Image (cartoon, helix red, strand yellow):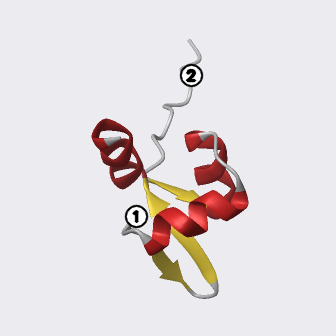
Amino acid sequence: MKQEPKKIERIFYTFQEAQEFLNISHQTIYELMKQGLSSHKIGRKRVFLKEDLVQWIKEH
């Protein structure tokens, strides 16, 4: 019997994925970062932890 592969839950989002997750524009996400939305750099890429995005949604 063939087993289906387990789905791995994403713990971070790229800049564009975070925009889509929050349904906001490129400029708005920059404004939110200035206001304290947490982000992290991995090399030259900026990423957002899913838990930080969910927490931001709960607070706003």
Residue 38 in the image: state x and y as whole percent.
38, 68
Above or below 26: residue 53: above
Give amino acid for label 2. Glu
Alpha carbon of mark 1 to alpha carbon of mark 2: how far? Answer: 36 Å
Element under label 1?
A: loop
> What element does badge 2 sit on?
loop
Quarter occupied by the C terminus: top left
In the figure, residue 36 lies in which quadrant?
Answer: bottom left
Identity of the amino acid at label 1?
Answer: Leu
Badge 2 is on which residue? 4
Q: Position of residue 53 (x, y in %)?
A: 41, 49
Residue 25 percent across, percent down from the top left: 70, 52
Q: Quadrant of residue 14?
A: bottom right
- Within-10-Å neighbours for mark 2: few <14, some 14–19, many 20+: few
Residue on which the image places disc 1: 37
Residue at (35% x, 54% y) in the render = 52
**Position above or below: 52 against 46:** above
Q: Nearer the viewer, residue 41 or 59?
A: 59
Please say if 45 is above or below 50.
below
Residue in the image at 58% along x and 41% along y: 21
Most extreme residue toward the top is 1
